[in-house]
Every structure is written in C-alpha cells, then in structure tokens.
Image (cartoon, helix red, strand yellow):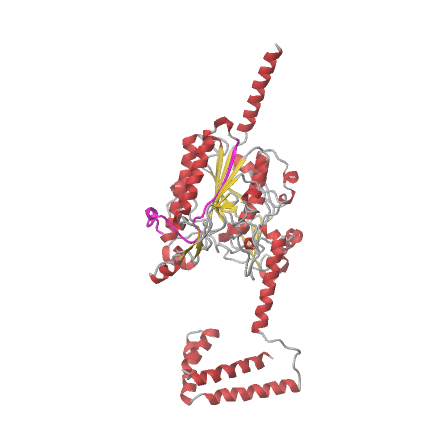
Amino acid sequence: MKRIHLLLLGVLCVFVVNASAASKPNIIFILADDMGYGDCSAYNSQSKVSTPNLDRLAKEGLLFTDAHSASATCTASRYGLLTGINPARRGVVNGICALGPVLEEKEVTVAELLRRQGYVARMFGKWHLGFEMKPAKPRPVYDFSKPFQGGPLDHGFDSFLGLRQAVSGAPYFYIRDRKAEAEPTETTKGTKNSAKANGKDSRTAYGAGAIAPGFVPEECNARLNDEVVQTIRKHAAMGDQANPLFLYYAMLQPHTPWLPEERFVGKSEAGPYGDYLVQMDHEVGRVLEALRETGLDRDTLVIFSSDNGALWPRSYIDATGHRANGPLAGGKARPEEGGHRVPFIARWPGRVPAGARTGATINHTDFLATCAELLEINLKQAAPEAAQDSHSFLNVLRNPANTHARPVMSVTPRSFRDGDWKLTFKPARSAGPEAREIDQASLYNLAEDLGESTDLSGSQTRRKAQLFAAFREYYSTLKLKPLAKQVQAGRAAAKTRSKAKTKPARTSKPTGKDLEEIRRQRTALMKKLDDLLTPQQKQAHADARKKVLAKGKGGVALRNAMDAALNLSPDQQKQFDKLRKEISDLTRN
C-alpha cells in the first residue's frame, strides 16, 4: 500500500511540475533595428513597403499605438529593454560601448530574471552593449586571445550568436558565445568606394577593414535567421523535457548598410531601404512559420518592436513618397515622437485578444516588469533599480480595454511625457537633464497634435511649469555609470581643446587707452587690406555682395561669394589671409 501511495505521489508531482511548466509561456522578442512607426502597413495604410507577415501578426495579436523604445538610439534603447532602467538616468548613450561593457554585474536583465524561473535564454543578432576591451590608442581593441567578457553570457543568456554592432564598420566577425567564430585576419576593401564610383547610394555600402574568413556582410541576416529557426525546431523536438524558452532576436534590418538579397531587390516602392524591410518581414514570417509547424505557437508570447525610429529626413520622403515614421515628427536620435514611438505587436493565442488595438502608453523598459508580473515575481526584490522605470502592462495584454495609467516617462534627457502632455527640449543633445532649463522646452498636447507642430508654451504656462517641475524631480535620482562619466569627461576635454584651438586666450579685458590702440591698429590693417586690392577687384567684390544679398542670403554664403569674386593671385591670397586673421584677432579683443 505504501508503495502505491509513493507511486501516486510521484505521478502527482510530475503533473504539478508539468502544470507549472505549462503556466510559463515561451517568450520571443523580435527587435528590428531603426524601423519607423510608419514602415509597417498595419500602422500605415500608405506605406510603400509590403509587410504581410507583420500584418498577420497584428491580426492574430494586439497592436499598440503608443509604444516607445527606451531611447532614440541603438545602445541606450537595448540597455533599457534588457534592464528595465531608463538609460537617460544612467547616462547611457551611443558610443559608450566602445569603452567596454555597458551592463554592470549588479544590473538584473530580463534574461537573468527568466533563467531564475527555469527558462533557457538564447540571443541572436546585434548586441551593441560592449565587451571588455584591451587598452590601446586611440581607442581600446578586442583581445581575440581571451574569451569575451561582459557580453550576453555574463548577463543571463545561455548562448549567443551575433555581432558586436551593425554591419557598418570593421572589424567584421561573428561572435559565438564568448569567442569569435573566426578572427578577422583578412582585409576587405568594402563597397563604399565602388558605390561612389558607380553613382550608387552610399547607404547600401559598408566600409573597408579587417574581416573574418567566410564572413559575407550581405549574408548576415539570412545566417542569423536560419539559426533562430533551427533553435525553435530543436527546442520543440525536446517536447516535455524542454524548459520554457526565452529567445531575443535582435535583427540587423533596416539599419544601414541596406543589404537586401537579390531576390528582394525592387520588391518595394521605397528603394533599397524598403527592399531591406521586405526581407526583414520575410524573416519574421519564417520565425512565425517555425512556431506554427512545431506547435509552439500555442503557448508562445511573441513580441515584435523596433529599437528606435527610422532615420528618414524630409529629402527621403520627397524621393520615395514613403513616410517611414508615419505622421510623427523627427526620427532616430531626435526627441520628437518619430525618434522613439515604435511599432509594438504582441501575440499569445488564447491569452492576448486577436485583432485588437490599444492606445495604452508603454515603454520597452516595461517589458521586465511585465515578465515579472506574469511569473508572479516581486520586482522590487528581484530588480530593485528597475522598479522606478519598469511598469507592467500585463493587464493590457489580458484585456486591451483595461485602464493603464503609466507614470511619467522620459525618452532621452530631451523628452518628458506625462499623460498626453509632453516637453521637448531643443538644445544640444549631448547635454544632460541637469542642464535643461524651462525656457529651452516646447510643450505639446499629443492627443490633439501628434505631429508636435504647435508649441503651447505661451497659452499653457502653468501646465508647462508643472511638467518641468516633474521633469526635475524625476531626474533628481540621476546616477551616471562609470563609463558614462568617462564619456562626459571625454566630451568636456574635446570641447576645451576645440575652444583653445579656435579662440586665442585673453588675459584681461582691454579698456580705455588699450581699446583706442586696438581700434587704431584695426583701422590701419583695414587700410592695408584695401590697398592690397585693385579697383577691378573692389568692384567685383561689391557686385558679388549686392547679388548675394538680393537672393536673401548672408553669413558664410555671403563671405564665400565675395571672396571668390576677388580672384586673388597666390601672393595676394597669402597677404589677404594674413591681414584678415590679424583683423579678426583684434576684433575679438
């Protein structure tokens, strides 16, 4: 009897374990690179790009119309997605990964959070969060003699196949887990020079430099896609023995260089960029098909989004008729909505309503908290630093009609949002939030003005003041990473060098007799300059001035036109430049 009881208990334990495993869905997050809000036809019926697979995903899932990347640039956005922490509060910016690993050991990633719950975590594609580097000048370099540290495997992932960044600059090589699959021991001339010589678009070309044997930039996307599909099939083949899967697929498209395969060339009405998106959509379709064929789609939460908006200025719109960022102002690296409002589609059959839409405001940083609530994890205990910036939207996934009042949101130190109201700061993007002032900000009501065309600062002074106070309060917890401090110090040093190079130091402000002497010297130099020119050159100079001013131009354009009209001899040019510099220095005094 005791043996029967033990047998029944064992069967019950197996049932409980399997039931527990079944309650944890597979999670696949597909992240496009520099894809705009208006690229996908599910978001923009006027899109010049056909995206049938993303459209199908939207019909089978939930489409978010007010979803935002964690930043308007690549590195910072990926940091926010994985950690749930707003990169602007830690000083994470593009370029920081060239100094070393962006992620710190104490920062909990979504991969680590899920692994603690029994998930196997796999990553494919663009990392762009740095590795430990070997000190060298002018910048650190990769040490291929040692395993790479600070990458995906040190932050929760069980495996990784991908690239350090986009295929835009050397060295070109694949990273498999902690090692280069093949070291970049060869050299490529790249395709930029040939593209220029043949009058082709430079955005479809990559630069020269070191490259690994067998590495073909045009084949990177297909190679990664094949591996993702194989991983899904292998996972499905394990059946009940498999732990739930977390797969992070950081695609390379449509970031430059635009390298569509031959079979996709001409398949869009938006040039090489659009063709590259068609290929990307095809690859998303292969992932969805692998899930369907293996039956994993029934219990897999699939999320598709982009790391930031498209880099798509007005000239590109005029040339193609395609609005990559739809109705939004700005684009990649900009504080306007086009820089960070991105497509976001979630599908989970039977759990997430199909063919639904929601206007709930969410951010990529919220993905961590959503996973935590889904698995009944206390976020404040598991990842305390993320709690301020990561806010679960699980209630919206379950029912898009649910109210979702997200707290204030800041995407880059130049953008601050509370409900429908938004502050956008215009000055230098390199400045931190502590340097922002209220008179530098514009105020918009996104509910009525999605394109951010009407600044309401004049009519909504009280609301603007309240929002600016909330902005200051939010950033009172600003805590720069050690690497961010290095970036900040480097920028300050570069600025100082630039000033020293262009502006001679002045010991004291001249007054009285000193000023009179400076004016006398300047008048004498002006006379020398006038004496240097012939009557014909003086007339040509005056005619050029009148002609340029009549066109409404001035500044540098005016000066260049007047200088060109002089047609100076080499000896005159030498004396002319010397006198002008002396006059400029005295004028500055």
Horizontal and vertical percent position of residue 167:
44, 52
At 57% from the left and 38% from the top, the residue drawn is: 370
In the visual, does 317 lie left or right of 66? left
Horizontal and vertical percent position of residue 512:
66, 85
What range is drawn magenta here? 243-269
Q: Nearer the viewer, residue 177 or 412?
A: 177
Q: Is residue 58 visible?
A: no
Q: Toward which corner of the image does residue 228 lie, by quadrant?
A: top left
Q: Is residue 526 visible?
A: yes
Q: Nearer the viewer, residue 487 or 20?
A: 487
Q: Nearer the viewer, residue 322 or 587?
A: 587
Horizontal and vertical percent position of residue 382:
64, 39
Please identify the quadrant where the N terminus is shown.
Answer: top right
In the visual, does 342 lie left or right of 475? left
Q: Up-down: is 260 above or below 500?
A: above
Q: Up-down: is 423 above or below 282?
A: below
Horizontal and vertical percent position of residue 144:
52, 50
Q: Is residue 247 magenta?
A: yes
Q: Is residue 172 magenta?
A: no
Q: Residue furthest top?
A: 1
Please identify the quadrant where the C terminus is shown.
Answer: bottom right
Q: Nearer the viewer, residue 423 or 67?
A: 67
Q: Toward which corner of the image does residue 510 lie, by quadrant?
A: bottom right
Magenta stretch mostly in which secondary structure? loop
Question: How many discs mark residues in the rendered view?
Answer: 0
